[in-house]
Image: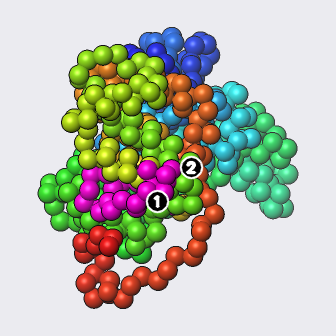
Amino acid sequence: MNRLIRHGLMFGNLFHVSSPALVERYNRALEHLTGKRTDLTDFHIDISGYSPEIGDALQDHAYLNHQGVNRQFILLSMEQRTAPLLHMKFSTSRGILKEFIDKNEAQLFALTARDAVAGELVNSVYDVSTPARLFDYRRVEIEADTTGGAVKDAWELGRLVGRFKNDKDGWYDDVLIAEMITLAGKTGDITRNPVSLSQMRFDQRNFWTAHFGGMYLFQDVAHPAVIAPGGKDHLGKLPIEHVFDAGDRNQIAKFLKLNGLVEPIVEGRKSRAAAILRQKMDFILVDAVADQGGDLTGATRADMRRLARQHHALLPPEFHALNALVNWAESGGAWPKIASDHPAYFYMFRASDTPDAALVNMLLAELAPKDARQMFICHKELFYATYKGWHEAKKAYVVDFLVAEYQVDKAGARDTLFGHDAPMEEPGPVPDMIARVGPWGAVRKKR
């Protein structure tokens, strides 16, 4: 993992807490939330205020996320908004925190100039002792204040000011006036500089969770389902009809298509798609030959072709199927027949333009695990876990590729891989057959 850290591919873009003032503010917030403090004088934090160094020191990496629900957070600086979220338990958590920060930018900038802001992502679920409990995870609200209670004090001062204005005897109420003066000394002039944070609620119907081996819950779609790539037998009874695992490839493919969640990479963009598919083939090739010896660092296109020729017998079906698809895109060859039960099938798709595109690309990264780049971009938790088991040659190749091809232009790479072109035509109607056999029947091969 040191190679990833050294190249900024792990623990990258964290906010560095090094000044005594910020360390003390963090400790006040940490004690406010958890009753704990840290003796560290220098550490890094993510968007939620979680620090890997403090987690090591406390021997508790869930010190801000007990039970994996209702994540607590500590904001010291607006710069945290660009940091990643480490040890993610729900795919929506980072987006919620970033939207909260963006929505309250001016207020948080003023509040964090003097104190830390501490809060919690609150929902009605306090434990996920069973998979069925995840279906109660429906809405998240944010509660936040400074450790000194500036927001609460400002609200109370506003209430007292209203009482002072509306009570005809307010001018003669010395106790009321004294309370207002005391609070104003803490909050400042709230008429010119209001101290308040927007009350924000987020509906959570479609999301990924790390609990129970990893599950994708799609509830707010036309045909709901749960997808647990790692296995479904241990999940027990769930309040949803359709539950799939990685072995249900036909059903997952049908689910994605019926809900309009995916589109072919090659749709309307043959030249760009061919380049993307070739890079997927490179990762598949490296996965197949990494343990054969030799240095893959800096391998050129000619080197990759040579490796493919030398180790042709080792190449898996995914490589050959994508090569046929590249041949169709570049040379006008025959359209390859790749059914949903083929190992290459999910390598051919990306998320369509829906609000759940990031979640779908995350799922596709898990269904097409040899594409290391997509896994790194879309599912870092899985990438880090998988990386540990790779051969050293593959680790070196993937890291070099990500540094040279992705880190230099993240926005451009994401746009190329996941950006959306104008659709070529309107989607056709769903066949009536679905109404008779149900949407989860086997996907037929193209004739």
Question: Residue at 58% of width from left, 73% of height from top?
Answer: 425
Q: Residue 108, which numbered label?
A: none
Question: Residue at 53% of width from left, 46% of height from top?
Answer: 417
The residue under label 2 is 271
- SS of the residue at dot 1? strand
The residue under label 1 is 264
Question: On the image, which quarter does residue 38 sit in?
Answer: top left
279, above or below 137, in the image: above
Q: Is residue 81 left or right of residue 126?
A: right
Q: Is residue 234 visible?
A: yes
- SS of the residue at dot 2? helix
413, above or below 25, in the image: below
Query: Dividing the image into 4 quarters, which one contains the N terminus?
Result: top left
State the residue in front, 50 or 398: 398
Q: Is residue 338 magenta?
A: yes
Question: Residue at 46% of width from left, 29% of height from top?
Answer: 301
Q: Position of residue 49 (x, y in %)?
A: 50, 30
Q: Residues within 10 Å of mark 1 (few under 14, many from 20)?
A: some
Q: Position of residue 432 (x, y in %)?
A: 36, 88
Q: Residues within 10 Å of mark 2 (few under 14, many from 20)?
A: few
Q: Position of residue 422 (x, y in %)?
A: 63, 63
Q: Amino acid at mark 2?
A: Ser
Question: On the image, which quarter does residue 412 sit in?
Answer: top right
Which region of the structure is painted magenta?
327-352
Q: Give the alpha-carbon distance from disc 2 to disc 1, as whole Å.
A: 14 Å
Q: Amino acid at mark 1?
A: Pro
Question: Residue at 32% of width from left, 20% of height from top?
Answer: 393
Q: Nearer the viewer, mark 2 or mark 1?
A: 2
